Each structure stands twice: as structure tokens, then as C-alpha cells.
Amino acid sequence: MRRSRLTALVAVAAVPLGILAACSGGGDEAAPAPSSTIPVTAKPEPEPIVVAPLTGLPLEDDALLDRPALVVKVDNHNKDARPQVGLDLADVVYEELVEGGATRFAAVFHSGDADPVGPVRSARTTDVDLTANLNRPLFAWSGANAGVSRQIRSAALVDMGWDAVPKEYYRAKGRRAPNNLFTRTSRLFELAPDDVGAAPALFRFRGEGDAVPAGATPAEGLRINFGGSTNLSVEWTWDAGTDRWVRTQAGTPHTVEDGTRISAENVVVQFVRYVNSGFVDTSGAASPEAEMVGEGEVWVLTAGRVVRGTWRRSAAGVLTVYTASTGAEIALTPGRTWVELPRPGQATVIEPTPPQPAVRSTDF
């Protein structure tokens, strides 16, 4: 009996499903044939890539999109301030002319931190308009004369200077004052008030696969001489191995304290007019002020090429637009950007060296 039941079960298992249904009783209707359609599972939409507004690079932490910009004034005295600390970590760096042909940096942080950064130095009147289109950024500085300080404190920014939050600054050992004052960006970001705006997108960036802007020509680099008694020289050179422009200052590689060479994916040379600010420094030298509103010539170094065009800014709170000679807005390589602010005529593009003709040897 056990063997017969096993044989019957095997036989039933071998009967087609349609016959089994017909033999099961319960009506004369035939069972529907099995469907030949294979259900398709829809592929999930890819998550949108969130990019940093100042660099165009992917952001690992979406919460950083709500973070304000933080501008840190960093000294560039060729002997006393170098090597700087944290300058290579800024998303954007502006180099502005100060007294005697010397320069000072306005380092803009957003997507990352520099703990520490410095040496932090005093502000200039140029900084009022320079920072006005950053949605009320945090501003780290170490003071200025009374007139400049009044302008800074009444500007569209959040005072995070040494006078405002002295506990967030410290004096570094091994450096002489005033080039020994440092701060930490992470601590300053923690103090940001709730009513500050998020950092804006200062530039347009190329997407993956986008071509370099039309009208771009190959360039090996760029030289700037800021003039004045200091006559500071700056050079940016294309490094094909890293796809970046590397910086040289006063004839030596510009490095930060840990030895890292300062570099950037883009160098924007925005030629501006300087006027007398009406103030002087501690030595009595007149302090120049860059006219950041208006228009002028611009050279954009990106992807081993230079794009020549025009910059325009209609008001202090409006973003600067960089337009190529073709009329199209200039799109940058995603990454860090340095904005140089020389006077017209103070910069020269380093053209590629033309290939030399091959020398033929002749047998006599």
C-alpha cells in the first residue's frame, strides 16, 4: 500500500496543471492558461548628486548645503606670513592688492574646514563689496583702523573677528606678531547665527563630458606683477600630471606649512581698477580699494587653457558673471578656484613653447 500511494503521488505530480484543474470538479469552465508575461521590476531612479556651490564637487554631507560661507583674511607678507596654514583648503581664494604692491588673501570656506587657518590679518575696504554677494557670510579678521572697522561692521556680513570672538583665536608659537594669529573654521561655523544665508554658487561649472569653452587656447601658465614698492610676482603653471595650476610666489613654490603646494583647478584673473580708499596703513601708506562693481577684462585659466572674456557685476549684492568673447558664460572645471585681482596690464599669459624642427644629420 505504501508503494502504491507513492506511485500515485508521482503520477499526480506529472499531470499538467490544466488537466488537474479540469478534473477537480466545481464546474464545467476551463481553467485559464498560465500567463506568459514576466513581471518587470522598475529600476529605482538614481539619487541626485548634491554638489558644493563653491566648487561644483559632490558633497558627502547634504547638510552642508545650508552652511554659510566663511571668509578668512589671511596675510601674504612674503617673509613674515609664509608659509600660511590652511590656505590650500579653501574653496575659493581672492588675492587683493594692499599697500605698496603687497597682497592679502580673502579665503572662502564652505565645503570643508581648516583647523587651523592663518595667519589672520586685518581687513580692507575692498572686502565690503567683495563679500557682499555671499549671502551675509561669516567674516574672520584681526581688526583695522577705526574707519575701516566701521565699514566692515556695518557691511552685509557676520563679524567673527578677533575683537568679536577673541576666545576663538590664538597666538602660535614660533611666529612673531602680528603674523602669529590663527583660528579654526569649524569653531567659527558653530557660532553662525540662524539668520545667515547659505553659500551661493559663485561660478558655473562644466558637467561630466562637457567640452572646454569655445575660444579657449592652450596656455602654459600666467605671470602677475602687482607693482608698487613690493612688486610682488606671482606665477601659475599648468601641471598636466595633476590637472591643476600650481602657484609660485617671488620665484619659489608657494607651499603651506605642511609642505603642500598651493594649486587650483581654475585661476580667474579679474582685472580691476583700484582707487584711493581714503585710509592709510600704520606706516602712512595709502590703502587701495578695488572696484568690484562694474565690468572689465577677465582671463580664465581652466583645463590647461585660457579663455579671454569680460566680467560684469551690476551691484554689490549681485553675482559676477564671466562671459567669453563668444558671448557664452564661461564654465569652470569643478574644483578649487583662485581669483586674482590685478590692475589692467599687470598680467601676462605664458604661451606654449612651439615645437622645434627636427635636426637632420648629413653624412659626408
Image (tube, rainbow, N blue to C red):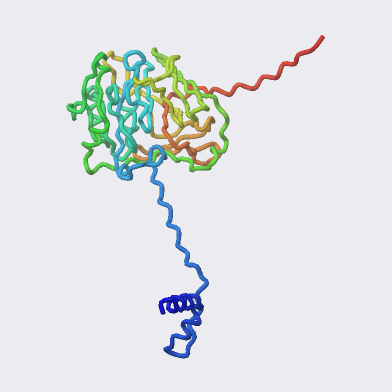
Q: Position of residue 345 (x, y in %)?
A: 49, 22
Q: State the residue lying farthest toward the bottom.
A: 28
Q: Position of residue 242 (x, y in %)?
A: 48, 28
Q: Vertical placement of 178 versus 195: above or below? A: above
Q: State the residue lying farthest toward the left.
A: 167
Q: Vertical placement of 32 versus 195: above or below? A: below
Residue 321 lies in what quarter of the image? top left
Q: Position of residue 333 (x, y in %)?
A: 47, 36
100 vs 334, left or right, is: left
147 vs 101, left or right, is: left
Q: State the residue lying farthest toward the top.
A: 364
Q: Position of residue 318 (x, y in %)?
A: 37, 40
Residue shown at 50%/25% (left/top)?
Answer: 239
Q: Nearer the viewer, residue 12 or 201?
A: 12
Quadrant for the N terminus, please: bottom left
Q: Nearer the viewer, residue 142 or 10?
A: 10
153 vs 298, left or right, is: left
24 vs 214, left or right, is: left
